[in-house]
Amino acid sequence: MSWLANLSKTYDNHTDYIGKIEMKKNGREYSLIPISHTTQSAHIEVILNGKGEFKRAVTIQKEDSSTIIPCTEAAASRTSAPVPYPLFDKLMYVAGDYTRYVGEVKGTPYADYMEQLRTWCKSPFAHQKVESIYQYLKKGTLIEDLIEEGVLCTDTQGKLLDKWISEEGIESKEKPEIFKVIVSEQSSAFVRFAVEIPEDTESRVWRDREVQQSFIQFYDMQLTETDLCYVTGGRLPYADKHASKIRNSGDKTKLISANDTSGFTFRGRFRTSRDAASVSYAVSQKAHNALKWLIDRQAYYLDGKVFLVWGVDRLDVPDPGGDLFPHLKKAKAKRRVGNAAHKEYANEVRKALSGYRYNNEHKSNVVIMILDAATPGRLSIVYYRDMNRELFMDKLQRWHESCFWQHQYKLDEEQKKYIAFTGAPATRDIAFAVYGPNAKEKVVKGLLERMLPCIVDERPIPLDIVRSAISRASNPIGMDMWEWEKTFSIACALVNKTYQKEGFQVSLNKDFDDRSYLFGRLLAIADVLENSELERERKASGKESKRATNAIRYMNAFSQRPERTWKIIQSSIQPYFEKMGGNSYRFHRLFDEVSSKMKPEQYTNVPLSGLYLLGFYSQRHDLYTSKKSKSDGAGQGQDGEQSNDEEYENDNEN
């Protein structure tokens, strides 16, 4: 029950947001819904005056269709049975002339709706705007008025059209607006009302806080039966049915449901669902409405699975599955290399996360929740963690300080170019490296779920994920160069995390004598040697060439059979040694230096570990950096070393 308690507390801590309309990036509206309310997409808006007289009606565009509506427990769970919403609803409920223009319906939806609305208007919590709507709908002329207004369309027999069919040979006949916003028949259009009263600044009834509060008090008066609430511990009016539409307005799944009294839901253990657990109506409403709001506000949504992280007291929490690029790139200080670089990067991580720490209340919590639906009617919590905010920030900091590498796949929106940054890759980018950009969403969301405990609970990264990233990074010929560079740097971050006890840095470790690391260095030297000569030839000829080096072409085979493949690569680069003449001395010296560190028994065809990627990356990075530094002597920071950003720009140039 802790998830219900945390969501209910989140609702209570953010009452200022109740009914406040916010906007998503795609232009859709959302808000923290009041209790006893839900949301619905409306198609038609009817404007009345204070006396309940029809003024006009309009078709609602999709971006403005989200509507907060009063809702009872029965209406929230309605399926095929005609159960009316209290105020706004479909035509079959609110139109007294529905049978005249459409036909007979099951039950008495209009009569049930009007009786419920009349009871509200006769209660001590009646509201003038609700009474205006009731007075108008009593006339039973809604569809007639909508037809005269041109909102609804009829056929030659005076019945509502089921679908729009343009007249043959008349291509200029424009499709009516109602058929542009509704996917089914006109008869299923959802109607909302606005009431224009002089000196009243809010005519939109669905946004009027007084109307919302009026219904809350009216409906609370009807909740008389109480039971023990398993969340609060008090005896309160209980929730017999719980909310749906959690992920979006069309979502029919529920987190809490026990409506199968004739099947195997209780399996003979309980007489009613409340014998198993009972949740009060207020807690259920607050928790579900808070969850809907948080999903709209800050959740990541993939193939029906929802990844949500929030703070109970302070909502904004860094996404554990994201990277710190937006924060780290703001640091202007030039970084050093080696251990100094790592210390400086660690300081930047601490600064980036310091703004999210909560110093006033040590009991402040962070909640991590993953939701997914196994069936169209049931939503499940597949992952849930409730932890102290400081503990969460400490774990997040350790993740970003351990699973890091230098990357260059982030686009700077201001400069309109890709820039370098050091940090841990986002889990979505890890999925890119492991499965490629065309992976199915079902596979990607599975990886995101598996990576979360590695960040939050500090578990080791699953070896199959690391091995898959290494395998793809070892096959550059099978992908475009930009894709490989991204995959390569992410694989290095995963390998660095896996072998964290070695304390690897991006800068070259010339004292490390691991076999795989040394083989990776040899491969990088061969790659830079051949690439520099190919670049010289391209400049001399003036022709562009995208030919890969032999080191890149044989990289996959090299990782599996290093001794045999290295002989092939060595023989392939001999012509470039001859072309370079005296300039080749530098590379001869490097080959000798690295080879001398390798013991004879290590020079075999045993497959290399992922450390060869780190050796390759660090050696290549060192060669390009030192080459640029020697050529112009520019861009040096403290201790005569270059900043990381400039080093990567040099790398790109080469």
Image: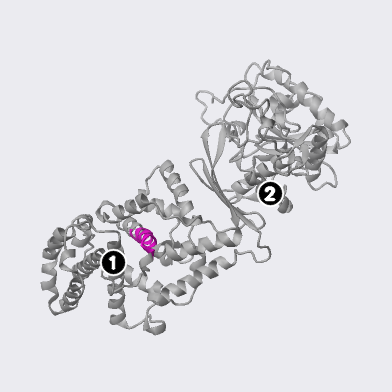
Residue drawn at point x = 70 percent, y = 32 percent: 191
Relative to 59, 654 lies left or right: left
Q: Which residue is mark 2?
A: 21
Residue 620: % across, % down: 28, 69
Residue type of the residue flagged with mark 1? Gly
Disc 1 crowd, CA 10 A, few/some/many (<14, 14-19, 20+): many
Where residue 653 sits, quadrant-wise, is bottom left
Residue drawn at point x = 27 percent, y = 62 percent: 612
**Which element type, helix, strand or loop, lies under badge 1?**
helix
Residue drawn at point x = 74 percent, y = 53 percent: 16
Asked whether 224 falls inside the magenta stretch, the response is no
Please state the extent of the stretch shown in magenta in the rendering.
488-500
Disc ID at residue 654 = none
The colour scheme used here is one colour
Where residue 261 sits, quadrant-wise, is top right
Q: How many marks?
A: 2
Q: Is residue 472 visible?
A: yes
Residue 130: % across, % down: 81, 35
